[in-house]
Image: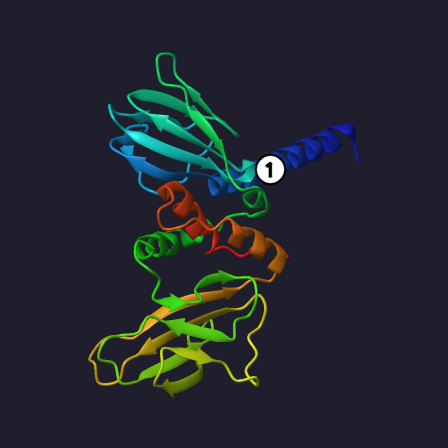
Amino acid sequence: MNQSVVHHLGTMTRHCLAALLFLAWIGTAGATILITDLEGSVRRDGKTLELLSQLAPKDRLQLGPGARAVVAFVAHAREYTLTGPGEFRVEAAALVAKPGSPQPVPRELPAVYRQIRLDTSRLGQAGVRLRAATGAPELLPSGLVAEAPRLFRWAPVTGAEAYVFRLADAKRNLIYEARLLDPALTLPETLKLRRGAIYYWGIEIPGSGREASWTRLHIASNPIVAKRLESARPDLHAPRSERALFALATETGLPD
């Protein structure tokens, strides 16, 4: 093989490798830089941003007067609070204020977030979970859990004479059902929930005409990381930025 052909193949290989690295960088950056709270006019290149919008390096953010935004760099376990009016540039691990704009205010996040690659395909589900968390949770356990639960409980419903408990697998195939008088159930010993699996469970009140309530249950494959994440759970009065990030983390598969 002559030198010109070898050189051409080497150039093609380098270009292919560069393209693959660029695609991998896009996936990583998009998955780890998020708007976790905002108020007022917050835009990227003139387009309005929403809660849990993804950002990437070189993005430029414009905040109007009185506006506020929190940007989380999840892989670095750090967030920045921005206030307007001002313009800011997104870097790989920080935000830079345009001259004359207020400086971003940094804050460290729980270190466990460095171990999690967020599943941004579940941003919509995280938003639903965040909105539902404004009141006391109705069904427990819910979301990501470190260990397979045996006990399931829910808020009593006034006037309910009985409850129907149902447990389904990830494809919504029913695997267990029971009729109960009290708002709690302990699974039989013969029914074992698998680590790393996703289930759905819910209750129905016979004769009430109400739709059944369901919630998603994800048993972590890595209980150590799951317990660390659980220790970072914000309470209902915590800043929305903390609750938004935790909501997405609980929708994400943890590293093995």
Count of marks overlaid on the render: 1
Position of 127 compared to 245: left or right? left
- Residue 251 spot, x, y in % from top left: 46, 56
User: Quick one: 189 or 127, which is closer to the camera?
Assistant: 189
Q: Which residue is at 29% across, 75% downward?
A: 212
Q: Which residue is at 39% across, 41% downward?
A: 241
Asked if residue 164 is positioned above or below residue 10 in the image, the reply reads below
Query: Would residue 254 be seen by someone viewing this image from the given angle?
Result: no
User: Quick one: 131 or 170, which is closer to the camera?
Assistant: 131
Hey, what amino acid is under mark 1? Leu
Furthest residue to the right?
1
User: Quick one: 164 or 4, which is closer to the camera?
Assistant: 164
- Residue 6 spot, x, y in % from top left: 75, 33
Q: Which residue is at 38% across, 34% downward?
A: 70
User: Quick one: 96 or 67, which is closer to the camera?
Assistant: 67
Asked if residue 58 is positioned above or below residue 229 in the image, the reply reads above
